[in-house]
Amino acid sequence: MKKIISLLVVTCFLFFKGFSESNSYNVQNNALVLPNTIEFDTHAYDVKDNKDPMLDYIAQYLKDRPTITKLRIEGHVYTEKSAAENMKLSLQRAAMISYYLTERGIACNRLIPVAFGDMKPVAPTDECNTNYNTRIDFFNAELNNKAVGNAVDGFAAKVFDPCE
């Protein structure tokens, strides 16, 4: 009886943390769609809360799927600053996410942090859409050591090596 209760408690804990028993994740066009966004302070590269449950969610996704041999972490930043500053900040944010994931036990060689700056908007580039265009996207870039699509790095303008 104690084993059944313990199992039930663990199962409920994992479910409420956002990880179901089936480990189902929303993946669309090789992109991991997060249930919530990862938030950064304005013009900063550190995550607002380094205990952000989305970081655990992404780490668990990779632990559950060892066939994903590379995950591309794309940084996109749209601010009133210059294109060069947006590029730099987007690379810093992608690199910081890779750091947080390695802290959660993900091998650095499975991560490809890249920067696009303000080059790939998903909404019109005006003041109302800054939150949509400033984001971190996650793509399965390599499965079983074979590239998904044309380029593992997504033809990014800047690439960071998280193992250095």
Image: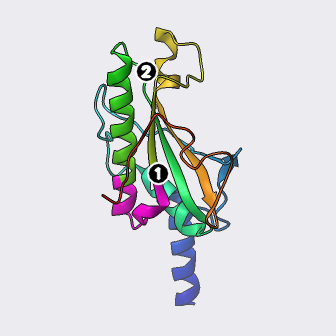
Left or right: where does residue 155 sit relative to residue 82?
A: right
Question: Label 2 crowding class (10 Å Cα cut-off): few <14, some 14-19, many 20+?
Answer: many
Which residue is rendered at x = 56% and y = 80% of the image? 7
Label 1 sits on what residue type? Ile
Left or right: where does residue 115 sit relative to residue 62?
A: left
- Relative to 10, say whether 148 is above or below: above
Label 2 sits on what residue type? Tyr
Figure quadrant of residue 56: bottom left
Percent x, y of residue 144: 64, 67
Which residue is rendered at x = 57% and y = 90% of the image? 1
Percent x, y of residue 96: 33, 46
Q: Mark 2 points at which residue?
A: 78
Q: Mark 1 points at which residue?
A: 112
- Relative to 83, say whether 103 is above or below: below
- Mark sitting earlier along the chain (2/1): 2
| Span shown in magenta | 99-112
The image quadrant where one finds the C terminus is bottom left
Asked which secondary structure carries label 1, the reply is: strand
Which residue is rendered at x = 46% and y = 10% of the image? 127
Camera-side residue of 138 and 114: 114
- Marker disc for residue 64: none
